[in-house]
Image (spheres, rainbow, N blue to C red):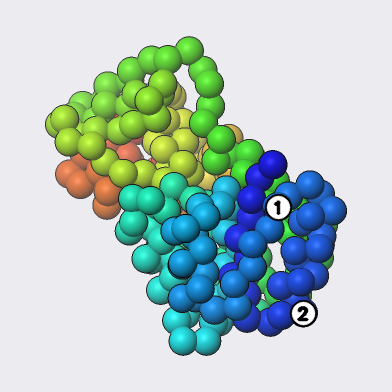
Amino acid sequence: MKTILIIEDERDLADLVAFNLEKEGYRTLTALDGANGLELARSQPPDLILLDLMLPGMMGMEVCKILKKSEKTAHIPVIMLTARGEEIDRVVGFEVGADDYVVKPFSTRELLLRVKAVLRRSLPDKPEGKVINVGPVTIDTERHMVAVEGDDVTLTTTEFKLLLNLAERLGRVQSRDLLLKNVWGYNYVGDTRTVDTHITRLRTKLGQAGELIKTVRGFGYKMEE
């Protein structure tokens, strides 16, 4: 049974989300502020976190930053919940490590679809184990690890899948829409900026090796030596 941690200061909304998730067979934990949410994430690591942006005391962005900097919680996917729908909020959310973003008011169906999609792509793929080398970058699919010139690089599951998708299609241009389909598993209608933001984070984590990922203006990305 998958466990989902809900960090949401509106008690009624938190209870409603928990009720609907439990109907779908999930186990839920609830925290009404960021500090308690962090404590629960550390003491009872969930499979996914639903994190409100506007929290008392500690904002959701700060909570997400702390989660993603800790080795114990960095792997846990995060879906941001917020009443703010401006693009800048979505971009900042992705930049601090959020895996998805749902704007209030949202339908139960939409939230459940997002939860299922994020959980699905957070599961390690089980292809035949192989090691892919692109320049100084080594991708070990069996161990789900990436290294640059022998030094391990910590990537989120989404970043790993994005890098692997590009590396397996070396030299071939991948459109943003195709990357959304292959990596995220469903379409973000009109929200290809999601790909751009994750590519920026991926390049940063790879350091100079990030230059292997090329932008094809007006279309998408490719990886080449």
Tell me which corner region of the image, top left, top right, bottom left or bottom right, holds residue 173: top left
Residue farthest left in this picture: 149
**Amino acid type of the residue that numbered disc 1 sits on in the rendered structure:** Arg
Residue farthest front in this picture: 43
Q: Looking at the rendered structure, which numbered label has been put on residue 81? A: none
| Quadrant where the N terminus is found in the figure | top right
Q: Is residue 167 left or right of residue 5?
A: left
| Picture coordinates of residue 108, whole percent (x, y) | 81, 62
- Front disc: 2 or 1: 1
Instruction: Write the residue at 82% across / 60% down.
Output: 20
**Amino acid type of the residue that numbered disc 2 sits on in the rendered structure:** Asp
| Picture coordinates of residue 73, whole percent (x, y) | 42, 53
| Residue behind mark 2 | 12
| Quadrant where the C terminus is found in the figure | top left
Instruction: Write the residue at 64% across / 62% down.
Output: 29
The answer to which of 20 and 172 lies nearer the viewer is 20
Report helix, strand or loop for mark 1. strand
Res 217 seen here: no
Tell me which corner region of the image, top left, top right, bottom left or bottom right, holds residue 30: bottom right
| Picture coordinates of residue 171, whole percent (x, y) | 37, 26
Instruction: Write the residue at 59% across / 72% down.
Output: 31
The answer to which of 135 and 24 lies nearer the viewer is 24
Q: CA distance from mark 2 to mark 1?
A: 18 Å
The answer to which of 218 and 209 lies nearer the viewer is 209
| Picture coordinates of residue 186, whole percent (x, y) | 67, 44
Res 150 seen here: yes
In the rendered structure, which disc, 2 or 1, sits on the residue that comes first in sequence? 2
Q: How dense is the environment of label 1, judged by Cα within 10 Å: few (below 14), some, or many (20 and up)? A: some
Q: How dense is the environment of label 2, judged by Cα within 10 Å: few (below 14), some, or many (20 and up)? A: few
The answer to whether 53 is drawn above or below residue 2 in the figure is below
Report helix, strand or loop for mark 2. helix
Q: Looking at the rendered structure, which numbered label has been put on residue 27? A: 1
